[in-house]
Image (cartoon, grey):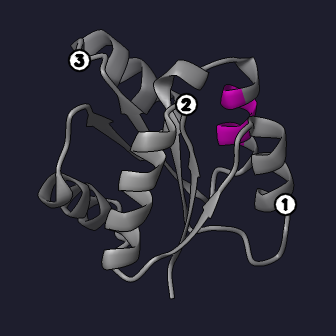
Amino acid sequence: MKTALIILDSKAMTFILQKMLEDLGFSVFVRSNLEEAHLLLSQENAPDVVFLDKVFHTETTDSLIRTFNNTKFIYISKETSPEQIQAALDLGVTEYIMKPFDHDILQSKLSLAGLL
């Protein structure tokens, strides 16, 4: 079973994404900050994919993505500029989902990332 880690600033969006991922057969972990994410990603059975809200983009986020470069990272953001998306991809983010999104978009992005 594939596993996902969600670190978003919105409890409502976290709940919706968790439900969507569970419907797709993922086991889901939810963490509230990047330090907790780092601990989880350091474990032997680390999640296959991490969903981060672009709002959390900091030096710590950059470090997390570079340190765990064998993990797929998907940004979720309301930012839609091509420059912002390219900057995220250059950093090492696997996929970028723009808000709002639906089940089909999520499934498509997970497929593109090789997770479905």
- Judge by depth and name the residue closer to the eye, 45 or 101: 101
Magenta span has 13? Answer: no
Task: Tell me how far mark 1 sits from mark 2, CA to CA.
Answer: 22 Å
Q: Percent x, y for residue 66? A: 69, 39
Considering only vertical position in the picture, is 41 above or below 115?
above
Give the residue drawn at x 47%, y 47%: 14
Say which of marks 1 and 2 sits in front.
Answer: 2
Q: Which residue is mark 3?
A: 80
Give the residue at the far bottom of this rendering: 1
Give the residue drawn at x 53%, y 28%: 91
Please state which amino acid type lies under the numbered disc 2.
Asp
* Secondary structure of residue under mark 2: loop
What predominant SS class does the magenta segment belong to?
A: helix
* Secondary structure of residue under mark 1: loop
Q: Which residue is mark 2?
A: 9
Q: Which residue is mark 1?
A: 42
Task: Tell me how far mark 3 sits from mark 1, CA to CA.
Answer: 31 Å
What range of the chain is rendered magenta? 61-66
Q: Percent x, y for residue 25? A: 38, 83
Quick check: can you spot residue 79? yes
